[in-house]
Image (cartoon, rainbow, N blue to C red):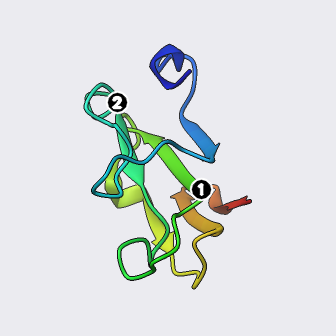
Amino acid sequence: MLRNLDPNKYDIACIQEPYLNPVNLANASNLSRFWDVVYPSNHHANLMCSQTLILVNKRISKNNWHIIHVNSPNVMAIELISLHGKVRIYNVY
């Protein structure tokens, strides 16, 4: 499914129940060319598997978004900043 996510059509994708490999990372080798893979802020500190992740299109400058800390493997958020203001996007499992 993720390899069919067209980076020319979408800027952000909120994924739930991602496949995580044995080192607890998304199989992002085919994604990293077009997407920044964002994990919950406590992803590696928590023994529970994360149930959410967000993909941010690399066309969006990292200067224009940041992760909002949420202490949960099932909830995560980012904040986008533009000339028009701020928008927060939450991915809740």
- Against 10, residue 66 (above or below) is below
**Is residue 47 toward the left or the right of residue 54 in the image?**
left
Q: CA distance from mark 2 to mark 1?
A: 16 Å
The kind of secondary structure element at disc 1 is strand
**Which quadrant holds the N terminus?**
top right
Q: Nearer the viewer, residue 69 or 42?
A: 42
Q: Residue at point 60% right, 58% down?
A: 51
**Which quadrant holds the C terminus?**
bottom right
Identify the residue position indicated by label 2 in the image. Answer: 31
Measured as percent of width and height from the top left, residue 26 is found at: 38, 45
Q: Residue at point 26% right, 28% down?
A: 33
Query: Where on the picture, by quarter, is residue 83?
Result: bottom right
Identify the residue position indicated by label 1 in the image. Answer: 52
Q: Residue at point 43% right, 71% down?
A: 43
- Dot 2 crowding, Cα within 10 Å, few <14, some 14–19, many 20+: some
**Is residue 15 toward the left or the right of residue 3 in the image?**
right
